[in-house]
Amino acid sequence: MTDNTLLSAPWRHGMPMHSVAWHADTGTAVTLNELHARIAAWQTTLDGLAAPGQRWLLHHRDPFDFAAALIALWERGDSAVLPADDRPETLTALDAQTAGRLGDVADGHLPDHGGAKPRWGSLVAGRVAVSLYTSGSSGEPKRIDKTFAQLDAELATHAELWPLEGRLTISQVSHQHIYGLLFAILRPLCEGAPLAGATCRYPETLANWLMRLADARQGDSQVQAQVPPGAVLISAPPPLEHLPTELDWRAAPSVLARVYSSGAALSQAASEHAYGVLGVAVSEIYGSSETGGIAWRQQQRGECWTPLPGIEVRDDDHGCLWLRSPYLPSPGIWERQADRIALEGDGFRLLGRVDRIIKVGGKRLSLTGMDRALAAHPEVLQARTLALPRHDTRLGAIVQLRAEHLPVDHASRREMIAALRSKLLGAFEPTVIPRYWRFVESWPTNAQGKLSAELMARLFRDLDDRRQPRWLGVERLGDRQCRVTLEVPERLTYLPGHFDSRPVVPGVVMVQWACELAREHLELVGEFQRLERVKFARLLLPGERVTLTLAITPVAQGARLDFSLDGRHGAYASGKALFGHSADEREAVHVE
Amino acid sequence: MANALELELKHLIIDTLELEDVTPDDIDPDEPLFVEGLGLDSIDALELGLALQKTYGIKLEADSEESRRHFANLKSLAALVEARRVD
């Protein structure tokens, strides 16, 4: 049997022409030789920066480059710190504890062109290989160190349960997190199977790649030797929920051997949807950054989770899950988790998180109980309450309503709040009833499928800045297009607040919102230059719910932003804003 | 003028308590401020008491029958301010 561990460094050996990556769109392979050259190039860069034994911040969207950088620094005797995302604040927070930034981020070092051979070092079981950050669904992101031994224990389980056997790994998730790192990068590397040459960002790309792989399998035998015998998909709830049925998925059932999902539980409806579209049952992995994988399931076979081999679970009097796992830093110790379970046969059902208890006005309150009470109303699909640090403590509620119940203006919003309040008053003290309500049409989640602390803060940001609209979620329509749902706060600074006159949002404020939100969601940079063809079609009143559609088009002198603000009565405002190149970009253009 | 003072008090209530879904128009001067009506609670009563003291120099016993009477609705609150303000 071949050794599939990181410690055996399988990338050092093998046939020079063996493919480590495969580009489905061109049908070309990237060989082990090329990987070695890239590792050597990264090492040249690193040697120029610091002596071995460093911690490096590493972020790179390209899976091949990411893998090469990781191996290069491991073999040099360094370790990697993987930021959860590439926002400037995230990166800055890590600068103090790292020797430098590597990859596709601002001030990130990239590999030198160098034809030298890579240097192999020695990998030690107890050495920290990577440090990851939790996505923080409950508070501040937390750093988690993983040793080679911990990662290897997990990789061995996967290889045993679901051997890749040379199949192509296609990933729709970020490898800056533990799940993507293990499944999309380390598994193929260790098992000598190719990874896709790029992250698969859109369902159209996925359908296309699967079709091309199927076609390539039909090609002549000369070419076929390079073509992977099939594929596995590393996915997550958001992309699986939104798999469009109208694409051509004919190749999927024959090409895809497995579909994985992790990050959050997949709803039963989404599981059925993905199964129907792809023709392959989704294997869900339950776990966390801290614990690694705990159990897995396929909902077509039932709701129960089966512990992964080597993992032991039990419950306590409170129904909490206790775990003993070789993936934890202390493999022999039982550790209590924040999830409640019901043991069933050889597995368990997940019953949700342990109650979150807070104090409001001196009274203890279970937020979990409040969430359940809200979700019990027929109009409500899902609800999440949280403590906001305002006047002692006040609750905020994020409530997903059926589309037909979404408030559209001040009056219908007040009605909805009054209706929910009066129902809650039967079971709760007035002081603990949510004061700040955010009604959403779709449940807000990050790329891992979680309603993160960051997203929750975003939903209530207008409370601290009265110049901002109420932000109720963003829907991506493509690379450079999105639709943001907004409400006009009744206490917006810009509304002339006179009793008798009619408060409205000034047109210039609508334009300001469009520009700010385009910078936030579409990475619009550059200086504002001018407006074109701006129309204000009707008055925008406090409490009204609107959608703001934003699209960016690159133009010779910078970028053009098309915006349109619409509500149930039709268009409120539309127009174009032009932006020049930012100072950085101008420089880059000049240098080239 | 009663109306001007009532409007001033409406703004004071909304701003002090950070009521995000209430406009001055939504506060009926005759409707109860607490529980039913506007739906204020005991934490709000404390905040409002502090604001009255800061703005008008009016001191109220925290949890007395008298305070409760003054806080019954916007009209009674306006009457209190009219009678006891120290400007």
Image (spheres, helix red, strand yellow):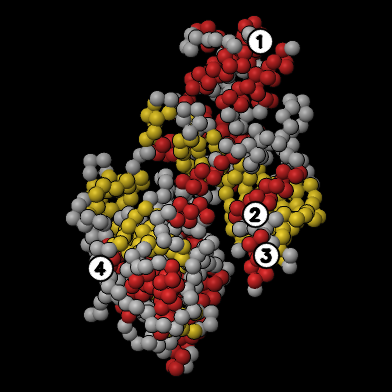
Sequence order check, earlier mark of 4 and 3: 4
Give the label, 3 or 2, closer to the camera: 3
**Share a chain, discs 3 and 2?**
yes
**Res A276 seen here:** no
- Tell me the subunit letter for badge 2: A
Q: Position of residue A408 (x, y in %)?
A: 65, 41
Distance Cα–Cα, label 4 vs label 3: 46 Å
Label 3: few (<14), some (14–19) or many (≥20) C-alpha neighbours in 10 Å: some
Q: Which label number is shown at residue A449?
A: none
* Disc 2 element: helix
Give the label, 1 or 3, closer to the camera: 3
Looking at numbered disc 3 in the image, what kind of residue is underneath it?
Arg
Q: Which label number is shown at residue A586?
A: 3
Q: Which label number is shown at residue A518?
A: 2
Looking at the image, residue A240 sits to the left or right of residue A146; the answer is right
- Tell me the subunit letter for badge 1: B
Sequence order check, earlier mark of 4 and 2: 4
Identify the residue position indicated by label 1 in the image.
B87
**Share a chain, discs 1 and 3?**
no
Give the label, 4 or 3, closer to the camera: 3
Looking at numbered disc 2 in the image, what kind of residue is underneath it?
Ala
Distance Cα–Cα, label 4 vs label 1: 77 Å
Cβ–Cβ under 8 Å for marks 4 and 2: no
Q: Quadrant of residue A178?
A: bottom left
Image point 46% across, 91% down: which residue? A223
Q: Quadrant of residue A318?
A: top left
